[in-house]
Image (spheres, coloured by chain):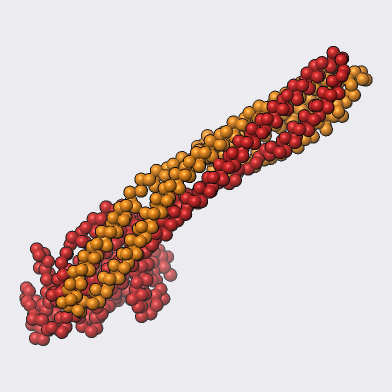
Chain colours: A orange, B red
Amino acid sequence: MSARLLPTVCLVSIYLVGGASIGSAQNVTPEALAAAQATAEKTEKDWFAQAQRLDAKLAPLLPCDATAKKAIQDVSHASDVRVTALMNYLRMASAQAAGQTQAARRLLATEESQAPEAADERTDAALERSAIEAQNANLAASFNARPGLADARNALGEINDIAARRTTFADQEASGRDRGLAALRDLVTAYQNREAALKQETDAFQAESTRWSTYYSVRLSRAQAECTAVGGGSPSAPARTPAKGAVKGKKKQ
Amino acid sequence: MRRPRSLTRGRRFSRGGTLRTLAGILAVVTAVITAMVTVSSAQSNRDAYRDAFKAWRQGDLNLERDAAASTDLSSRTEADAAAAARYTTARSAYLRAAVAQNNASVQWLTTARLAPEPDLAPAVDLQRLVAQSTEQVATQIATYADDSDPALQPVRQSLARERSALVALSGAINDRQTAATKAAGAWIVVEQTRVRAMEPYEAMAGALRGEASGLDQEALAWAEYYRKLAEDTRAVVTTTTPSPTTVSGVRINNPARNPSGAAPADAAGGVRVNNPAGGTTAPRPNSPATAPPGGSSGSRFVGAWAYQMGGLYHGPEPDVVNLVVKEEGGMLTGTVDARFWPFGDIKTVTSLRFEFSGAPGTGRVQSLPLVTADGAKGSIELIPGPAFNLLEINFFTDRRPGKMTYGNMMLLRR
């Protein structure tokens, strides 16, 4: 496989892998996202290293040196690869965010459907308490006539205490449910905002990638113009030794 | 012949268990049972426990009132204790289902934690790169600025386009960085909100667990209450020497007062038969000293019992145990159909069937002889559990190759 084809193969691979990951569902696994992030980081690093060296690499070359055109094209390809990888990551992150928004909405819907339960719980606890109190009242009356019922009366008193504590727990549950619902609504909103922010970031990166592409295209045009200026046809054409001094300085600065 | 230790006296539980120990056992058993109920029963909803509550509360409205005058409320307290247990079991199942659902919400909120937004294309680095290229282009433009050579015109134009492209690129990087910063901020808000949302759900989990735990205590307390109510009303009998009553040829000291419209009580219904006709003239006390309060008349054991998967056992692990106990002619008879998982030298699942019969003693624990389906002899102990609906059995048989010769487990009334 030629070195020229390699970036293209990388691009296709990233598309395929990324496409499969996203296409599977909005439910992007953390592992898939981490893998996409790792790929994006690596391709970014590779491109950045090449881009940093580009000007220094071109400086000593003559205008029509074919190496110059290839160097620009290589960096441009590396840029395309990293843009693809980054876009893939952002799309997956967006898909994950959308999935989480949906999951949070479902959780909220479930919890909202359970909201009346808290009131029911309180009602039932109150019913239980009133039934125990009725028993207590009857037993107290019997106790007056028959003191031997003391043990039973004490036992019922303990039950009343336990039921009272349970009522407190029921109140705490109801309070927690109210606060939980409010927090879940906030969470759904936060997820929606993040989803929207990620989409904006994706759009912004798409715009930036277009600018990078334009820049490398223009950079290649300049190399062509410089070669033409010294009488060469194309930087990739067989090298013709330019006349000394045909272009000021001959070498790029 | 090896005798397994009793569940309540063996190594699983302390010797001479106190009420607290029993309460602990009941809590464990209740937890196991209710957990199973939660998983396996469709009854774990509010309707189920409300129905049970209604049945309990509408069952015997005058029990406490009648305690003032009644001399034996055993059958009524047992009926109410059973109804209370049905209610607390259903209620507990509901609460545990609610705990499980709440836990699922907490679990989701916990696992929904997002990794921080990575800065995959740091704008600072890219801007530096762009700045370097822009500077280099500016130098080139300056170099050709004063040169009027028309051949250089395309180069100057290319450089100008490149500079414009770099300016546009710089702006795009800034825009993207702004969007990335916003997304990172949105991530922070999500995480803060998520953590904030966990607090009330964790508080709810604590409250629900507290309710469920309280209900477990209450279940035990209700059993204890009804036992004491029966005991307190019976206690009076020992000092008042009641006049014997004869029902169907059987002399009964203190027939339970029938709730209006209820069928006449019989022995299996919890009426204590003290002196069969033709017995001694003087009536024996209802609660002999050898039997603890709420002790074991034969009726305590009568009924169908089964081992619940995941229940308590000692020694060979049961797969299935079904026990049916009857009381006929003053004799306790019963059959056990059991299946055990491989244990010790026995490498396969084994079945065991035996029958037992004997006169119930006055003690709390009934020890009766048994005969297995293949003729082996042994004995079985019926030990009242810590709640009315629990029964421990402890049996052993002569050794038979490939057959389980002992077993010890807690059964639940069916």
Quadrant placement of the N terminus of chain B: bottom left
Q: Is residue B185 above or below residue B256?
A: above
Can the viewer see residue B385 in this picture? yes
Name the residue rendered at 41%, 54% in the picture: A176
Horizontal arrangement in the rendering, residue A37 relative to residue A118 (left or right): right
Name the residue rendered at 63%, 36% in the picture: B178
Q: Position of residue B321 (x, y in %)?
A: 31, 65
Q: Position of residue B379 (x, y in %)?
A: 29, 76
Q: Position of residue B228 (x, y in %)?
A: 24, 75
Horizontal arrangement in the rendering, residue A223 relative to residue A122 (left or right): right
Give residue A199's quadrant in the image. Answer: top right
Which residue ends up furthest to the top in the rendered image? B150
Q: Is residue A1 above or below residue B69?
A: above
Q: Is residue B333 above or below residue A41?
A: below
Q: Position of residue B81 (x, y in %)?
A: 23, 67
Q: Please state which of residues A106 and A166 is positioned toward the viewer in this rendering.
A: A166
- Please tell me how many numbered marks the rendered image carries: 0
Name the residue rendered at 74%, 32% in the picture: B130
Name the residue rendered at 41%, 76% in the picture: B11
Quadrant placement of the C terminus of chain B: bottom left
